[in-house]
Image (spheres, grey):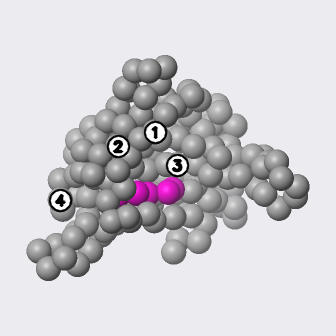
Amino acid sequence: MCFRILRQARKRKRMRLLIQRVLEASVTIGGVVKSKTGKGLLALVGFEAADSEEDLLWGAAKLARLRIFDDEQGVMNLSLQDVGGEALIVSQFTLHAQTKKGNRPSYIQAARPECAVAMYNKLVDLVQAELQKPVGTGEFGADMQVSLINDGPVTIWIDTKRRE
């Protein structure tokens, strides 16, 4: 149901991804490691209600094909697909925090859970299809502890509205 509505809302789409190149990353929930990854990417992802399937397709392809891994000459010229790296995708509604007024962030732009869960699951499926292997995940809505060793450090901010 969400995607039917989302296809009509093309003017304000802005799925946000905070992508970090990592040597390793993990998600722990209630003291138990849910997912962990070796060399690859950790993607924190936030959705807005106006995001579309087009945003999810574009974001999944960008995550898999973003050339931020070093080649033989030490130049960032290789993608996650090229290096056979792993991915860990964690939902994070706070990426849509609005801090314009006062000191308490507003999350009104973040998608409601019933839509965000569907978008998160679809994005994970699309990235798995791009990479041709399983992707680690967090647990939507859970209190998660995310650990990582950022490699570089390399951290990339992507907003599907701007596509820059």
Three-letter amino acid code at the position of disc 2: Ala
Q: Nearer the viewer, mark 4 or mark 2?
A: 2
For label 4, the residue is 83
Is 100 displayed left or right of 134 in the figure? right
At a point 38% along the width and 46% down the height, the residue shown is 148
**Could one spot residue 122 in this view of the protein?**
no
For label 1, the residue is 146
Distance from Cα at disc 4 to Cα at disc 2: 17 Å
Q: Are marks 1 and 2 in contact (CB under 8 Å)?
A: yes
Is 17 displayed left or right of 50 in the figure? left
Distance from Cα at disc 1 to Cα at disc 3: 13 Å
Query: Residue 26 or 138: which is nearer the viewer?
Result: 26
Query: Residue 106 or 29: which is nearer the viewer?
Result: 29
Three-letter amino acid code at the position of disc 3: Val
**Pointer 4 or 2: first along the chain:** 2
User: Magenta segment range?
Assistant: 17-21
For label 2, the residue is 25
Distance from Cα at disc 3 to Cα at disc 2: 15 Å
Three-letter amino acid code at the position of disc 1: Val
